[in-house]
Image (cartoon, grey):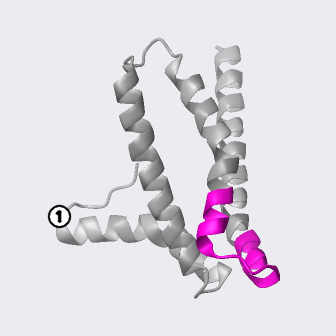
Amino acid sequence: MKSDLTKSNYYFARGILIALCGAVLFSTKAIFVKLAYRDTPVDALTLLALRMIFSIPFFIGAAAFSSNKTTNVKFTGKEWIYVALIGCLGYYVSSFLDFVGLQYVSAGMERLILFIYPTLTLLMSAIIFKVKIKPL
């Protein structure tokens, strides 16, 4: 029993650490983009292209790692292409709008908007769909 509790605590602490690292890295992206805008004559499309080029290996690695699980539905080659296209389109559009927005607002304001987005979504769903907000 004690080993299960210890293992559970280990995974919980590991999850918290990963979430914190992700939040910090997510927040620093805007700072680097603002520095690039300030120090170089670069536009949003060029920065976005560089970001996408550097991130492709990580996305491919994550897809390969998660697709090897035995509980997953196996995709055909055509389905992988569709998933990749939808993922690239969604990533491109959201990142492009984010990078263009950084030309007009401060990095702090952009981070505030992105981090408050889930709260706004929750409040809007409670108002529009009349869903009661309950704790987990």
| Image coordinates for residue 127, horizontal then vertical, percent | 22, 72
- Residue 100, by quadrant, is bottom right
Asked whether, in this view, residue 40 is left or right of residue 122, the answer is right
Which residue does the image show at 21% across and 60% down from the upper left? Answer: 131
The residue identified by callout 1 is 129
Query: Front-most of 105 and 82?
Result: 82
Magenta includes 44? Answer: yes
Q: Residue at x 68, y 71 (%)?
A: 30
Q: Is residue 131 visible?
A: yes
Q: Which three-letter amino acid code belongs to the residue tagged 1?
A: Phe
Left or right relative to 25: residue 65? left
Looking at the image, can residue 111 be seen? Answer: no
> Callout 1: helix, strand or loop?
loop
Q: Position of residue 49 (x, y in %)?
A: 62, 59
* Magenta portion: prevailing SS class: helix
Percent position of residue 41, x then y: 75, 81
Residue placed most toward the observer, 95 or 19: 95
Q: Residue at x 41, y 33 (%)?
A: 81
Position of residue 6 relative to residue 59, above or below, is above
**For mark 1, does the 10 Å Cα neighbourhood hold few (<14), some (14 to 19), or many (20 or more) residues?**
few
Residue at the extreme bottom of the image, as rendered? 104
Seen from the viewer's position, the closer of residues 98 and 82 is: 82
Which residues are drawn in magenta?
A: 31-50
Locate residue 108: give its quadrant.
Answer: bottom right
Left or right: 29 as drawn, with respect to 119: right
